[in-house]
């Protein structure tokens, strides 16, 4: 018996030593409903490399495997993933407070020109949600997750199977839209809005369910739409897809992290937002050039359509306010709208010279937004 106890003690000590030698970073499961090799997944990979290099955390990234884009919000809520890439417009009631500024993104491409509508909306959305919108935070808490930054895509264009060269060409076209405001834009010119998840666009275009998809150009690669896109009309409807939580963390997971780990995630999530947004901006030109090389016709937006879009955005402001007040029960909508519109104008100026620079964009997001969060209290109450 004595020898047995001695052996057991020695074995325990050996396991303890080996365990210490093989200790590794805590791994968080991260779901993103895009395939590998796109602007978003590449940005997450860059973020993960910094996370592994600078902290004791790392991501196990599931690219279009664990959860698709529509499944990710409830998947993060229920703990199927520790964190994920959340598209809030798929859940208009649950994330109505976030969807208000997301539906205002066409303001980024009218009036004062923006060098990158995506950079503008990444900044404006992040600042509004994390610093100015308690109701946004309450809705994320109700979905058992916290928000750690937005991204913005390049301006929306038309990916079509038939050409859009004028306002008259929109009439009768079936147009996929993920944003209510952009759907109303299509309807105002005689088009028909079609709502369907991003992962279903390829099949819908190939089978004629939709004639056009209103989406940013990099989704040609992210969603493998090169083969079904025959025409691209630039600049229409404009705006940006900004209803994204690029690093939403399950609330139980978040509260189980140490204060140091939460601090690190807040700090590096500024880079995550910047990296994905800049990747999107750079990928837009690359994918349009690639599409053109594959025989897709690139159509410049007619001037009449620019002017008509400016008029639509001005008139649609009242529709947005009324919709979010009446349909989703938001309070103080006028004040919120004005705050968001002011932030969009602010971020047009802030990003004018650094919209394509990841490090500069990271520093800007950190200074203006992320540095003002307290890891001891954010998401902890």
Image (tube, rainbow, N blue to C red):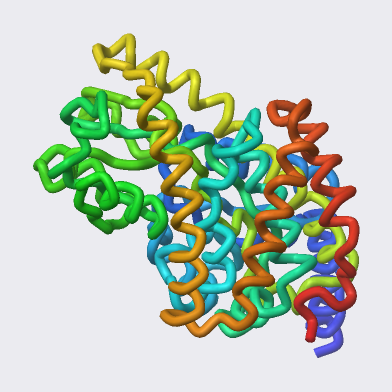
Viewer-side residue, 291 vs 321: 321
Furthest-bottom residue in this view: 1
Which residue is painted at 43% across and 52% down in the image? 33
Q: In which quarter of the image is the C terminus?
A: bottom right
Image position, residue 246 (x, y; %)? 60, 54
Which residue is painted at 86% across and 78% down in the image? 377
Which residue is painted at 39% across and 34% down in the image? 236
Q: Is residue 164 above or below residue 40?
A: above
Q: In this view, does 25 lie above or below 169?
A: below
Q: In this view, does 220 lie above or below 194?
A: above
Can residue 235 be seen at all in this image of the molecule?
yes
Question: In the visual, does 321 lie left or right of 168?
Answer: right
Viewer-side residue, 81 vs 212: 212
Image position, residue 379 (x, y; %)? 76, 77
Can residue 23 be seen at all in this image of the molecule?
no
Image position, residue 172 (x, y; %)? 13, 44
Question: In the visual, does 152 lie left or right of 191?
Answer: right
């Amino acid at each position: 018996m004595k020898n047995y106890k001695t052996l057991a003690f020695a074995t325990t000590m050996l396991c303890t030593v080996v365990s210490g030698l093989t200790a590794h970073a805590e791994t968080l499961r991260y779901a993103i409903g895009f395939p590998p090799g796109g602007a978003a997944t590449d940005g997450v990979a860059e973020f993960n490399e910094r996370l592994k290099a600078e902290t004791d955390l790392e991501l196990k990234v599931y690219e279009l495997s664990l959860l698709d884009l529509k499944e990710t919000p409830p998947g993060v809520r229920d703990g199927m993933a520790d964190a994920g890439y959340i598209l809030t417009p798929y859940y208009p009631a649950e994330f109505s407070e976030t969807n208000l500024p997301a539906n205002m993104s066409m303001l980024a491409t009218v009036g004062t020109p923006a060098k990158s509508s995506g950079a503008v909306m990444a900044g404006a959305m992040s600042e509004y949600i994390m610093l100015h919108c308690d109701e946004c935070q309450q809705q994320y808490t109700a979905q058992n997750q916290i928000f750690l930054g937005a991204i913005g895509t390049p301006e929306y264009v038309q990916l079509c199977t038939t050409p859009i060269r004028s306002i008259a060409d929109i009439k009768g076209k079936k147009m996929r839209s993920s944003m209510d405001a952009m759907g109303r834009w299509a309807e105002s010119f005689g088009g028909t809005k079609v709502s369907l998840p991003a992962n279903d666009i390829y099949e819908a275009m190939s089978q004629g369910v939709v004639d056009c998809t209103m989406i940013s150009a990099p989704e040609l690669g992210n969603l493998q739409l090169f083969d079904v896109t025959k025409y691209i009309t630039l600049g229409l409807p404009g705006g940006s897809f900004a209803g994204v939580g690029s690093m939403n963390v399950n609330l139980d997971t978040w509260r189980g992290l140490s204060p140091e780990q939460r601090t690190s995630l807040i700090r590096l999530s500024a880079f995550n937002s910047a990296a994905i947004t800049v990747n999107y901006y750079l990928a837009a030109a690359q994918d349009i050039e690639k599409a053109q090389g594959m025989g897709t016709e690139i159509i410049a937006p007619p001037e009449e359509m620019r002017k008509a879009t400016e008029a639509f955005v001005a008139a649609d402001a009242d529709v947005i306010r009324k919709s979010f007040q009446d349909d989703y029960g938001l309070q103080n909508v006028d004040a919120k709208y004005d705050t968001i519109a002011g932030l969009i104008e602010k971020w047009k100026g802030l990003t004018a010279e650094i919209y394509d620079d990841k490090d500069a964009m990271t520093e800007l997001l950190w200074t203006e937004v992320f540095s003002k969060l307290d890891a001891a209290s954010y998401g902890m109450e």
